[in-house]
Image (spheres, rainbow, N blue to C red):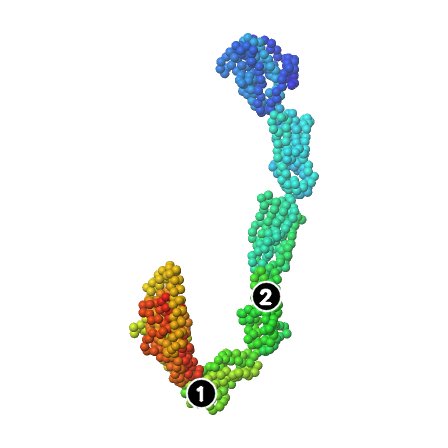
Amino acid sequence: MECSLRPSATQVLSLWTLVIGSFNIAGLRPGPQSVCAESLDASKLTAVSGGEATLPCETRTPQPPDSLLLIVWYKDDVPIYSYDGRVKGPSAHWADASLGGRAKWHAAPHSGLHIHNVVPTDRALYRCRADFKITPTKNLKIILDVVELPEKPKIFDEEDKEVVGVAGPYIEDTSLRLTCVVSGGKPMPTLRWWRDDEVVAKQDPMEDGSRLSLLELKIPKLRRDYYEAVYTCTASNTVLVQPLRVNVQIQLYLRPLYVEILAREQPLSVGMEAELACRAVGARPPAIITWFMDNIPMEVNEPQKNSEDRNETISFLRWTPRMEHNGREITCRATHSKLEHSVLQTTTTLNLHYAPIVVLQLGSKLNPNDIEEGDDVYFECVVRANPPAYKVVWEHNGQLMTHNQRAGVIAGSAHLALQGVSREQAGRYVCTASNVEGDGRSLPVNLQVIYKPVCRNTALAIVGAAINEPARVACEVDAFPPPKNFQWTLNNTLGTIELESGKFTIDSFGRSILSFTPTSDADYGSLACRATNLAGQQVHPCKYTLLPAVRPEPPTNCSYLNVTDDSAELRCVAGYDGGLQTTYFVEAWESGVLIANVSTITPTWKLHGLGSGKVFKLLFYANNARGRSEVTKLKVHTLSRLALHTEAKTTTMGNIDTGWAVGVVVGGVGTVIAVAIIVLLARKRQRRPIQCEAPVQTVKTYKGPTGNSTHSPVQPDDKNPDVVPLGKDFNCTRDLERPPEPPPYGAVLSPPVGLSRSAHSLHEGRTNAPCTPNTPASDVQSISTLAEDRRSVTSGTLSRRREIVTTRTPLLANARESCV
């Protein structure tokens, strides 16, 4: 507090006018000597410029009934404020103009003069005088010190440019110098540089009259840990308020630390889209990543990605490797957008996986056009694969080959040897190699084996030809190379004659076509054809029997299979075709109306749309250029939908009481055993013909144990084409006499099939055989099978026919009795 402070004359005059107008204030003596003397016992109070200050005043009295009359405030012994307790209302307060309405006295909660928006001129010695009605006057002295805050600090760089927020960017490993400048402040402020709550530089107050405070921050080498470091400059000259501060962030250009191509879990495969990832770490700003293959830039369609802290940058390269890329170098290069000579790169060699590439070739020392039967042949299978192939297989004409040294086949992973090659081993050879990427198949290599002609059809062919009508005979041989010459001979009763070359031709397929016209019975006989190629003449000729062309024989052993409620499958055995192309017919008649007429080149048919529960008469015959054969007849019953429904119900009910069925079966077995013993005894005593009859079981009366509506009424042997369904009634007899002699070749009989009686083994009358109990027609009986021997036409005789009938008893559905 300086004693040289003096109030103005206007202030003194105003205060004295107020005091004289109210009452006489004793003891007020303005003057510098009294101010300096009174300041010795004054208390100190500090306020901040622009802030607030409350100057206390003692207004309490020991005698509560006492009242406050007058309070006067003095600034350096000059009255500046008063309060008159005897006056009511606002007029009780008076303030000097220097306060400018910034001060007001408050009695509660604590008596004092409150000054807001403190200014530096408020710095002075204040005295509060309180006058009471009874209690003596009280005085309280206060020295008010006003602190003037400095201006907010400012930061300048090396080029004296003000830095706001961010300093830089600086290049890594260079130096830095920042200056914090603070203007004003009373007293002079203390400056400090901070980093992470740690003081790195400090400047104490200096009174040099410039009113400026300076503090420099020096960093000789900016390492990576200075990146985005925050420094703070503070200025403080009082503890009443927080220090003034300003922050600056250090920004750096950082080179990339390293770059790498990230490893893949799966290898790269040729022909499949691949993805490679390259990561660059440590660059600021983020590095720019480019890709090269053998120093040739590669196109990258996706933008590179930065991590959240922008410390890592990843670039993805997507492309489809080709076979020629294998073994090439892929380079990932990371560059800095601002720094030169800051390039980092890494390189990897492509190791592409691919399916085997297979090349098959004939042995280098073999002439593919000069391989004959009996020569040794070998193949080489050249395989390129990554990873290596784990399996190599060989194929011949599409069939897999296996190692078989006994057969002269030696198959390895790279070679195939054929010892003593035969003409059957000619054809297309392929080798296939496999690895985890797939299979590689070679192009086929055709092996040509030179061999003499052989007949394509080794069976004796019968050719039918009419007198004075040309017959066409084709001689087909297998040969390599194809034959160029043919020789035809005719062997008849006159001997062996070589036919003229003008009677046959050779077509583009290597066949010889003979056009032969018999003019008499002597022209019939045996034809022979021999072919000749580069390997030589055919050893065994192709033979044909030339016979007079006749009408075909009718189909035999006709039967039906899989009869349903609307369809039937039919099958017959073909007879002699008369030496000509033959067509087989079936006609289905119902009540004299033709329902279907179907022709095929083989005696098998399938008829549809017949209708349910109907009886059809089937006529089978064959036809060729010489005419039509005799007719074979057969009856067929299509199933009834009602019968099928009944079968299903019966099967369901039959499954319920299995205990009763077991009892019946046991009883039936005993009955059969007893009957068998009686039959054996009867056969020993009497050698008489045994007759038995088995009525045909119709669909409506038979209910099978399976309940399957799709099965034929004849159980289950009706699918055998040798089984011929019987008629309504059937009688069998065993005769000890030999059968009659068969008729000659030209009079071969074809007994009707499907009739109720057989001309050779069935009697006209129906008698009960001892081997079969005579049951009423309503009993459940079923004929299971009827097997007969085929008729042979090769010897020109009719073989003996044997017919077997099997019946089931009503109690033993599974037990059969047969008689021959």
**Residue bearing the label numbered 1:** 524
Q: From what the image shows, is residue 261 above or below residue 45?
A: below
Say which quarter of the image contains residue 786: bottom left
Say which quarter of the image contains residue 284: top right
Task: Look at the numbered disc 1 and give the secondary structure of its residue.
Answer: loop
Task: Look at the numbered disc 2 and give the secondary structure of its residue.
Answer: strand
Outermost residue to the bottom: 494
Q: Quadrant of the C terminus?
A: bottom left
Amino acid type for the residue under numbered disc 1: Tyr
Residue at image x 61%, y 45%? 311
Q: CA distance from mark 2 to mark 1?
A: 57 Å
Which of these two is toward me, 685 or 710?
A: 685
Q: Position of residue 133 (x, y in %)?
A: 54, 9
Q: Quadrant of the N terminus?
A: top right
Q: From what the image shows, is residue 199 above or below residue 710?
A: above
Say which quarter of the image contains residue 421: bottom right
**Residue bearing the label numbered 2:** 392
Residue at image x 63%, y 16%? 42
Q: Position of residue 808 (x, y in %)?
A: 37, 69
- Residue 601 seen: no
Which of these two is toward me, 142 or 332?
A: 332
- Marks 2/1 in contact by CB < 8 Å: the verdict is no
- Residue 675 seen: yes
The answer to which of marks 2 and 1 sits earlier in the sequence is 2
Which of these two is toward me, 472 or 659?
A: 659
Circle 1 packing at 10 Å, graded few (<14), some (14-19), many (20+), is many
How many labels sit on residues? 2
Residue at image x 64%, y 12%? 34
Circle 2 packing at 10 Å, graded few (<14), some (14-19), many (20+), is many
